[in-house]
Image: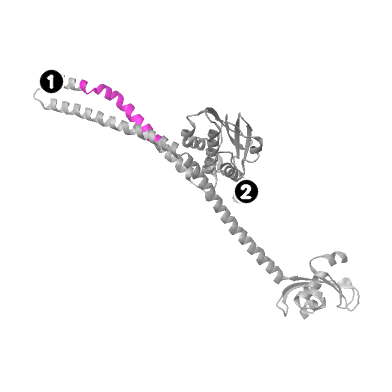
Amino acid sequence: MLWALSVTDNAVMLVDCAGRVTLANAATRALAERVESGAAPEYLLNLLPKDAWTLACQSGSWHGDITTPSGVLLAIALHHDEQAGPAGHAGMVRSFVTFDDLSARNGRERELQLRHDELQNTYRRLAGTQEQLLQSEKMASIGQLAAGVAHEINNPIGYVHSNLGTLQEYIGALFALVEAHEAALQSADPAACREEVRGKRDRLDIDFIIGDLPKLLAESREGIERVTKIVHDLKDFSHTGRDEAMRPSDLHRGLESTLNIVWNDLKYKVRLEKHYGELPLVECHQSEINQVLMNLLINAGQAITERGSIVIATGAESGEAWISIADSGCGISPDALQRIFEPFYTTKPIGRGTGLGLAIAYSIVAKHHGRIEVTSTPGAGSAFRVVLPVVQPRDAEGA
């Protein structure tokens, strides 16, 4: 026991029945020196109030805080053993005294709190920077697809505009027929004008207009709905959702929304196959998962130089949902495969990749407590599989 007391970092002192110090460990001697230069351990003992010994004898212990003449705040604990022997019996340990430098401890606590606050501020700045980086990469991805998205919008707008011109002609013909009917009704002999009205109807090709008009309106409505869907998908995609809680989301809907944005970039060289399984609603930030899917689809398209296929499959098992995107492109070499998730690493030509897409995708999936699995064969293609828990861990989500 004496050896343990001598090596402990706590300031400990043993006092015999005569009130003399029988043991003062190194921590006690260092504390005495720190409190009063050149002071011996007995100096600390003399700091105890007079009633401390009396109270310790009565109850077995005494605890108190004192401030030394030099301004150091000490917490002192005095433990008294009444069975040790009669007072004045030299050499027999009767009291056990511990000292704790509260000033130093408070200083350490303040320093730790300061470091904690600094770390919190740094974390918040890093989180903000990461969010800005994620949003910038998202906008850069949309920028790469801007021409295709513009085409996807301009195409339906173009035929809606053309249909409106045709519709204007149809309306003119219908108004002319209405006026002919009105003139016939206002004449003295409406029946005599019947052949004239019928001839006008034939010349205006009213039967064709009646048959074509519903198709014209349906086609125009479809075009407007197409544009509305693209704009809605872009709005969903650009939404940050940083401060929102993860909520149950339809991954199939997010996948279709993302395909709607990237399709013009793929449709001229890609044959798309879909093998969708049953998926439950998955707790996630939908816009962030959409960004992961868009990045993987863009990469798959860029891996195909002329013609090829992309196979998208989905499924769920053991409390996890997964989406697989496989391409028949150029594949990834084993050396590059080890580094594809490193920030700023890219095998694409300058101007075609930032080297951040897969790194950000990896961090998003990791934040969702999921994983990305990759297999690739050079010259034969690659497959990326995003696996997400259906329900986020409650403690992790709270943290």
Say which label, 2 or 1, has the lower sequence index: 1
Mark 1 is surrounded, within 10 Å at the Cα level, by few (under 14), some (14 to 19) or many (20 or more) other residues, namely few
On whether residue 322 falls in the magenta region, the answer is: no
Mark 1 and mark 2 in contact (Cβ < 8 Å)? Answer: no
Residue 39 coordinates in the image, percent (x, y)? 80, 78
Q: Is residue 301 above or below residue 60?
A: above
**Separation (CA) of disc 2 from disc 1:** 85 Å
Residue 215 placement, left or right of 295: left
Residue 65 coordinates in the image, percent (x, y)? 72, 74
- As drawn, which residue projects farthest toward the front? 350
* Label annotation for residue 396: 2
* Residue in front for this viewpoint, 185 or 38: 38
Q: Residue type at mark 2?
A: Ala
Mark 2 is surrounded, within 10 Å at the Cα level, by few (under 14), some (14 to 19) or many (20 or more) other residues, namely few
Residue in the picture at 59% in, 55% down: 123
Tell how many labels.
2
Q: Is residue 250 above or below residue 56?
A: above
Residue 180 visible in the picture: yes
Residue 144 coordinates in the image, percent (x, y)? 48, 40
- As drawn, which residue projects farthest toward the left? 188
On whether residue 216 falls in the magenta region, the answer is: yes
Residue in the picture at 81% in, 65% down: 8
From the image, tell me which residue sits under label 1: 191
**Element at label 1:** helix
Residue in the picture at 11% in, 20% down: 192
Residue 374 coordinates in the image, percent (x, y)? 63, 36
What's drawn in magenta, residue-wise?
202-226
* Label annotation for residue 279: none
Residue in the picture at 17% in, 22% down: 197
Main structural element of the magenta stretch: helix, strand or loop? helix
* Residue in front for this viewpoint, 133 or 32: 133
